[in-house]
Image (cartoon, grey):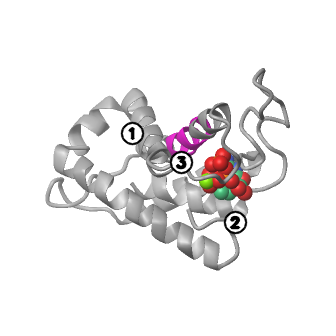
Amino acid sequence: MLPAYVPNSAAVVLGGGTPIDGGRVHEDGRRLLGDGKTYRGLVLGILAGVLIGCVQLLVQTGDFPEVLPLQTPLSIVTLAAGALLGDLVKSYFKRRRGMAKGEEWPIADQYDLVAGALLLTLIAAPSWVLTYVTLPVLFWILVLTPLLHRAANLVGYSLGLKDVPW
Ligand code: CTP
Ligand code: MG
């Protein structure tokens, strides 16, 4: 899941600038996505996820399930891109619910990247998901993701990179 986890943090550090929605407003009068979703965060975030995935491609060895799932060039791209696309979709629904940028939406804020990454990978590389995302793997993804998410956001907040510690 590293290529899916890294893009969120990378977007916080490297993001900013022109928002993807271009400031456009939905018919409900609220922003389509909001100022927190930028082109720079999306593109550089995905690149950072792909980069960590390339490191995994270089160092990984052995056979699943003795080792962790093995990345492929396709899986690192779909995990990284899916994570931030899931984040975009979540923000779209946050705005539709009338929630401000940065407002906490429990469950959705933590699992958007998991849903996005696994769904996009399921579409693009179904056999990868069926082979590697076994029930125990899925269990640990669901347990570890909120913990990692919280830890990363606390670090981001204390470094002054994020406005809120979630
Ligand atoms: N970010 C970005 N581009 C993205 C995703 C994130 O530039 N595609 C940056 C923004 O600076 C954003 C920060 O990372 O403010 C934190 O991301 P996130 O928590 O996902 O966004 P929020 O600002 O909390 O907005 P939302 O309420 O829509 O989740
Ligand atoms: Mg947020």
Label 2: how many Cα within 10 Å (few below 14, some 14–19, many 20+): few
**CB atoms of marks 2 and 1 within 8 Å:** no
Given the image, on which type of amino acid does mark 3 rest?
A: Trp
Residue to which mark 2 is pinned? 163
The residue shown at (62%, 34%) is 97
Residue to which mark 1 is pinned? 118
Closest to the camera, between mark 1 and mark 3, is: 3
Please tell me whether mark 3 sits on a helix, a strand or a loop: loop
Percent x, y of residue 118: 39, 39
Mark 2: is the Cβ under 8 angstroms from ligand 1?
yes
- Whether residue 64 is visible, yes or no, is yes
The mark nearer the N terminus, 1 or 3, is 3
- Compared with 156, 11 (above or below) is above
Mark 3: is the Cβ under 8 angstroms from ligand 1?
yes
- Compared with 115, 25 (above or below) is above
Mostly what secondary structure, the magenta segment?
A: helix
Closest to the camera, between mark 2 and mark 1, is: 2
Q: Which residues are magenta?
A: 81-89
Residue to which mark 3 is pinned? 105
State the CA–CA distance, disc 1 to disc 3. 20 Å
